[in-house]
Amino acid sequence: MSENERKILICQGSGCVSSKSPEVKKALEEGISKADFENKPVVKLTGCHGFCEQGPVVVIEPEGTFYVNVKIDDVEEIIESHFKNNQPVEKLFYKDPETGEAIQRYSDIKFYSRQQKIVLRNCGALNPEDIEDYTSRGGYEALKKVIAEMTPEQVIEELKVSGLRGRGGGGFPTGRKWEAGLLAKEKEKYVVCNADEGDPGAFMDRSMLEADPHSVLEGMIIACYTIGSQKGYIYVRAEYPLAVKRLQIAIDQAREKGFLGDNIMGSDFNCEMVVFLGAGAFVCGESTALTLSMEGRRGYPKASPRPRTTEEGLYDKPTLLNNVKSFGFVPEIINKGGDWFAGIGTETSKGTAVFALTGMVNNCGLIEVPMGITLREIIYDIGGGIIGGKKFKAVQTGGPSGGCLPETFLDTPVDYDTLTAAGSMMGSGGMVIMDETTCMVDIARYFLDFTEKESCGQCVHCRLGTKQMLNILEDITLGKGQPGDIELLLEIGEATNAGSLCGLGQSAANPVLTTIRYFREEYEEHINNKRCPAKACAELISYRIQTDKCKGCSLCKKACPVEAITGEKKEAHMIDQDKCIRCGMCLEKCPKKFGSVECVPGRLNEGGE
C-alpha cells in the first residue's frame, strides 16, 4: 500500500470498540463497496489512537482528517460529502474546549501536537492484526540488526547509553538489569513481560498490546537473544481479552515469518513466546509475586533480603522481567541508537513517558510526552484544561499508591526523581486530575479502599495498617472523625510504608500522607466542624431551597424519593432536613433558570440554618 493511497483508519482499541466502532467499520466497508466513485479508499482497523473519550475515532489518510464520536448514521454523509464531493464533514471535527474552534487535522490538535511518540509511534497507524503493516513501518529491522551485527554486550551497552529506565514504576536502569541477566550462570533462563496492569483508571499497557503487539514481541525477542534465553512469557490480565487475542495473533504471525521458533533468521538462535493469563491480583505486578503466580502458587511477594529475579525468578531460574513499555522502547533504541534516546528527557530520566490521562480534564486519553514536561503543560495544553472551566485542585500520579499534588506543583517537571521528592511517583503511568468538587479526604479513602482489598495480607503492617487507615477515613467522611485522627493516620501511614514487605505496602499510605500534607485544612473541617468543603461527602452536606428564588414548579418535590420536600404549586417549597437523605435529586431537577436548590457544606437544622 503506497503512502499516498487513501485510507480510512478506524480505531478499534477497547474504548472505541465499546462505542461500536466495529459496526462503524462494517458500515463504511459496505458503503464504500456500493459507492460510485473512483480511487476508493481502503478501510482498515487500527489500535488505540489515544484520544479515547472522543471515540469512535476515524482518520482519513494521507490528509490526516480527524473525525470524532462517529456513529453508524454518519457513515453515509462521510462517503457522500468527504469522498464523492471532497467536502470534509465539519460537524464531526474535534472542537477545542477553550475556543470552540472545529479542527480538521489531528496534527493541529494540542492533544497530539504537544506529544512526542516513540513507544506509541505505531498506535493508531497500523493494523495490529497484520504483521505486514508492522514490517512495512520498519518492524523487526532491529531484531535483524541485533542478530546479524551485534553481540549481547553491544545490545546492553546501547541500552546503558540510552539511559532507559524501567517503565513499570521502579525506574531501575534497563541496561543494568539486562546485564545481570546475561551474567547469570544458569543455562536455562526466562524473559517475562509484566502486563499485569491493575491500577484504577490505567490503560497504558492494555492499549499498547492492543495497538502494537509486535513492538513488544520484538523487544522481548531481542531480550532473549541478549541474555541467552529461549523462552519468553507475557503475563497479562485475563480481563484484557482483546489484548490477549491480538498478542496471540502476533505471536502466530511472527512464528510464521521466522521471527520466532528455531534458527531465527538463519542463525542458531531459538526463541518461543507464551501468553500467560493472570487472575487479576494487583499485588502480582510485583516481580516475585508474579513469578510465583506463574508457577501456580499464591502471589505472595518474597521477603527481603532475597535474590533478584535475574538471579532466581521463574522456576528458580534467572528471569529478566520488564514492563510492556520497557520492551516496546527497545526496537527504536536499537534502530536509532542510545545517544538519540538519551537526547530526550532530563539528566536522570531519559526518553518519554506514557500516561493514561483521566479525571476532570477535557481531553482524556493515552499520551506520550518527553520526560521533563511540566504537569501544567500536560493538564492545560494536552488535556485542554479542567472540565467546565472549574478550578484545578490536585493531580495524582503513579496509580493508587501515588501522591496527590496541589496547584503549587503544577510547574513541577515530570520525571522519576522530582515526583518522588514531591511525595508522589512516576509509577506505571496513571495520572488522575481532580477539580474543586473533589474531596481530598474521600479520594484518600477511595484509594485506600483499593489497596486494602488488594493487599495479599502476608505482612502485618500492610494487612492491618491499610485496614486501620481505611476505617479512620471512613469515619471522617461519615462525620464521625475525632480529634487526634490526623496524627493517628500519619503514624499508621508512616509505619505501613516503612514496615511492609513489597512495593504495594511501602507506598500504600502515599495518598493519605500527601493529602494530609497538602490539604490538612480539609481534614480539619471534616473532623472539627463536620463539614465537607468540596460538598462531596453525603453525611457532611445539606440541600436547601432558597425561598426567594423558588417558583413552586414542584419538579424537585416530584423527584424526591423520600418525600422530604413540601410546598404547594407556585409557592416556595421547603426541605425537611430530618427526612432528607442528601441524594441530590432536587438539585438535579431544579431548572437552571431558577437555581433555587443549593448544596451547602455541613448539616442544617430543621429550619434550614
Image (cartoon, grey):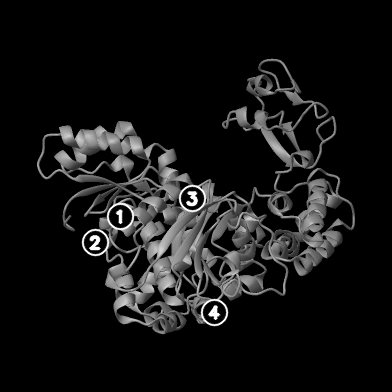
Disc 4 residue type? Ala
Residue wearing tag 2: 136
Q: Considering depth in this image, is 246 or 606 the residue closer to the camera? A: 246
Judge depth for marks 3 and 2 and give the one in front. Answer: 2
Q: Residue at x 68, y 63 (%)?
A: 301
Q: Position of residue 400 (x, y in %)?
A: 64, 56
Judge depth for marks 2 and 1 and give the one in front. Answer: 2
The alpha-carbon separation of the residues under discs 3 and 4 comes to 49 Å
Q: Looking at the figure, which quarter contains the N terminus?
A: bottom left
Q: Kindly give the residue lying farthest to the top in the view shown.
A: 569
Mark sitting earlier along the chain (3/2): 2
Asked whether the beta carbons under mark 3 and mark 4 sit within 8 Å of each other, the answer is no
**Residue 124 in sight here:** no
Mark sitting earlier along the chain (3/4): 4
Q: How many neighbours does mark 2 have within 10 angstroms: few (below 14), some (14-19), or many (20 or more)?
A: few
Mark sitting earlier along the chain (2/1): 1
Judge depth for marks 4 and 2 and give the one in front. Answer: 4
Image position of 511 (left or right of 309): right
Judge depth for marks 3 and 4 and give the one in front. Answer: 4
Say which mark, if any, is on residue 126.
Answer: 1
Q: Considering depth in this image, is 442 or 283 the residue closer to the camera? A: 283
Q: Looking at the figure, which quarter contains the C terminus?
A: top right
Mark sitting earlier along the chain (4/1): 1
Q: Position of residue 462 (x, y in %)?
A: 77, 59
Residue wearing tag 4: 184
Q: How many neighbours does mark 3 have within 10 angstroms: few (below 14), some (14-19), or many (20 or more)?
A: many
Disc 1 residue type? Leu
Residue wearing tag 3: 362
Disc 2 residue type? Ser
Q: Look at the numbered disc 2 and give the secondary structure of its residue.
A: helix
Judge depth for marks 3 and 1 and give the one in front. Answer: 1
The alpha-carbon separation of the residues under discs 3 and 1 comes to 27 Å
